Image (spheres, rainbow, N blue to C red):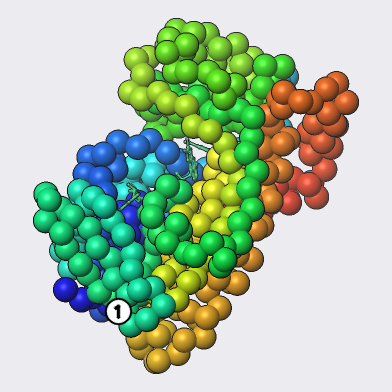
C-alpha cells in the first residue's frame, strides 16, 4: 500500500496533523499501537492555549469545546500563604481554556472516519524503513498479519517512548535532557473544584496544583519523591494532604470523592533537535518533553503540527519545500522558549531535595517580586497563554 503521509501515533499530535492534512485533500493513514479506549483512558493535559483551540475551531471541531470548555481569565501562584493572581486576560488580552486532553482526542477520533482519515489501532512491531529515499515505509502487524505502507513522508507523532525518534542514526542525533528529582501524583474525582481558577502552590512540603475539568470534576496534583509508589498513597492520605495545602488558599472547601484515576508521572525536560531526518519528521512528545508545570506539552504538540501541516501543504500545493526545510528551525525556536518557561516555573514552585535555606529564600523573594511587579506578571502571563505561532 502507498499513501502520501503515514502518521505514527494517534495521540493529540498525530490526530491533529491527520485532520489538518486531510482538510487540504492530502491522504493520510494513522498507525497506533494501542486501542481507542486505552488512548482515551490516559488522563493528562487540561489547559489549552488560544493557538490550540483556534486549530480545533479552524477544523470545524470546536462544537463541544465551545459548549463544555471553561474559559479562564487568570490563574494563581501561591507561596503557601497568599495567592498571587495572574490576570492573563488583562495583561495579555488572551485567555486559556480548560478542556481535557481526553476530550480533544475524543473529538479528533470521532470525526476521523467521516473525513476519510483511516486509523489503524492495535498495530504491533511498528518499524520505519528507508527514510532517506523514495521508498520510505512503515511496517507493522495487526492480529498477526504483517503490513507495509510506503509514504512520501512519515510523521513521527508516537510520544516519548515511540520508535520514530529511535529510527534516526546515532551520528545525526542532537539531544538535551534534565531529569527532576520528583514526580507528580495526580487524582481525578467528580467533586467541585476548590477554587474557580487554577492554583499552583509552593508550600513547606513542596508543590501542589489545584486544577479542574468541569464545574463538577477536579484534578489535583502534588509533588512526591521519585521513590514513592502509588500503593503508598491511599486516597484518604492524598485528600488530607490536599486539604492541608489548599484549604487556607482556596475560595471553597477541598471536597473529597472517590478517585476516577490516580497515577504518578516523572518530570523531565528533553529536546531532541533532530526533528527531521530524510522523509521523517518528528512532532510533539516524540521530539520534546517539558515538565508539566505551565501546561505546555499538549500545546507544543499542537504548534509543531501546525507548522508541519503548513509545510506539507505547501509541498503538495505549490511544490514549495522551503517549509519542510525550515520546519526544524521554526519548531525549535518555539520549543526552546516553552522549555525555558516550564523549567523556570518548575524551579520556582517545587522543593528540590538538594536545595537549602538560601534557595528557599530565593524562591520566596522571586514570588514576592512577582506579587509586586506588573512587568514580571506580564512576562509570566504571556508565556502561560502561549507565545505566538
Ligand atoms: P502522546 O499523547 O504520548 O501520543 C503518542 C501516541 O503514540 C500514543 O497514542 C501512543 O500509544 C502512540 N505510540 C507509542 N508508541 C507507538 C508505537 N510503537 N507504534 C504506534 N503508536 C505508538 N500538556 C499540556 O499542554 N497541558 C497540561 O496541562 C499538561 N498536563 C500534563 C499532565 C501530566 C500528568 C502529563 C503526564 C502530561 C501533561 N501534559 C500537559 C503533556 C501532554 O499530555 C503531552 O505533551 C501530549 O500528550 C503530547 O501529545 P503527543 O501526541 O505528542 O504524544
Ligand atoms: C493540568 C496539568 C498541568 O500540567 C497544568 O500545568 C495545569 C493543569 C491539569 O491536568 O489539569
Instruction: Answer with left or right where residue 23 lies relative to residue 313.
Output: left
Q: Look at the image and tell me in which quarter the N terminus lies.
A: bottom left
The answer to whether the beta carbon of the residue marked 1 is less than 8 Å from any atom of ligand 1 is no
Q: Which of 118 and 150 is in front in this view?
A: 150
Where does label 1 land, which residue?
Answer: 135
Q: In this view, does 180 lie above or below 120?
A: above
Question: Which residue shows up at 53% across the image and 18% down it?
Answer: 228
Q: Is residue 18 above or below residue 135?
A: above
Instruction: Answer with left or right where residue 296 lies relative to residue 86.
Output: left
Asked if residue 229 can be seen in this view, the reply is: yes
Q: Where is residue 187 in the image (x, y as percent from the top left)?
A: 43, 23
Which residue extends farthest right?
358
Q: Nearer the viewer, residue 40 or 144?
A: 144
Q: Nearer the viewer, residue 172 or 305?
A: 172
Question: Which residue shows up at 80% across the image and 50% down it?
Answer: 375
Location of residue 113 by image quarter: bottom left
Q: Where is residue 26 in the image (x, y as percent from the top left)?
A: 27, 77
Q: Position of residue 270 (x, y in %)?
A: 59, 49
Q: Nearer the viewer, residue 101 or 267?
A: 267
Q: Look at the image and tell me in which quarter the C terminus lies.
A: bottom right
Provide the secondary structure element on which disc 1 rests: loop
Q: Where is residue 260 in the image (x, y as percent from the top left)?
A: 33, 23
Asked if residue 62 can be seen in this view, the reply is: no
Amino acid at each position: 500500500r502507498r499513501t502520501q503521509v503515514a502518521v505514527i501515533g494517534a495521540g493529540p499530535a498525530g490526530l491533529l496533523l491527520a485532520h489538518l492534512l486531510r482538510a487540504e485533500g492530502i491522504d493520510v493513514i494513522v498507525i497506533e499501537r494501542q486501542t481507542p479506549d486505552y488512548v482515551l483512558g490516559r488522563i493528562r493535559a487540561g489547559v489549552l492555549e488560544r493557538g490550540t483551540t483556534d486549530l480545533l475551531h479552524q477544523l470545524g471541531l470546536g462544537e463541544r469545546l465551545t459548549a463544555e470548555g471553561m474559559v479562564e481569565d487568570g490563574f494563581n501562584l501561591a507561596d503557601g500563604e497568599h495567592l498571587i493572581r495572574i490576570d492573563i486576560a488583562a495583561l495579555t488580552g488572551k485567555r486559556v481554556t480548560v478542556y481535557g486532553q481526553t476530550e480533544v482526542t475524543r473529538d479528533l477520533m470521532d470525526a476521523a472516519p467521516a473525513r476519510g482519515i483511516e486509523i489503524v489501532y492495535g498495530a504491533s512491531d511498528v518499524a520505519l524503513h528507508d527514510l532517506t529515499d523514495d521508498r520510505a515505509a512503515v511496517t507493522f502487524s495487526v492480529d498477526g498479519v504483517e503490513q507495509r505502507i510506503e509514504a512520501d513522508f512519515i510523521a513521527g507523532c508516537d510520544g516519548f517512548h515511540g520508535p520514530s525518534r529511535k529510527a534516526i542514526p546515532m551520528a545525526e542525533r542532537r539531544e538535551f535532557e534534565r531529569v527532576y528529582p520528583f514526580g507528580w501524583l495526580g487524582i481525578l474525582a467528580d467533586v467541585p473544584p476548590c477554587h474557580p481558577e487554577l492554583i499552583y502552590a509552593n508550600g513547606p512540603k513542596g508543590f501542589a496544583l489545584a486544577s479542574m475539568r468541569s464545574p463538577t470534576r477536579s484534578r489535583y496534583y502534588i509533588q512526591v519523591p521519585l521513590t514513592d509508589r502509588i500503593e503508598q498513597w491511599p486516597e484518604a492520605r492524598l485528600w488530607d494532604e490536599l486539604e492541608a495545602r489548599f484549604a487556607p488558599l482556596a475560595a471553597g472547601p477541598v471536597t473529597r470523592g472517590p478517585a476516577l484515576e490516580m497515577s504518578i508521572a516523572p518530570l523531565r525536560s528533553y529536546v531532541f533537535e533532530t526533528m527531521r531526518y530524510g522523509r521523517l519528521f518528528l512532532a510533539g512528545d516524540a521530539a520534546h518533553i517539558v515538565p508539566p508545570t505551565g501546561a505546555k506539552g499538549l500545546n507544543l504538540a499542537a504548534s509543531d503540527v501546525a507548522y508541519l501541516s503548513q509545510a506539507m501543504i505547501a509541498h503538495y500545493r505549490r511544490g514549495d519545500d522551503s517549509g519542510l526545510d525550515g520546519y526544524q528551525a521554526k519548531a525549535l525556536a518555539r520549543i526552546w522558549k516553552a522549555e525555558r518557561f516550564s523549567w523556570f516555573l518548575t524551579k520556582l514552585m517545587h522543593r528540590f531535595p538538594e536545595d537549602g535555606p538560601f534557595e528557599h529564600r530565593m524562591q520566596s523573594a522571586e514570588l514576592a517580586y512577582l506579587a509586586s511587579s506588573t512587568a514580571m506578571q506580564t512576562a509570566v502571563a504571556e508565556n502561560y497563554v502561549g507565545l505566538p505561532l
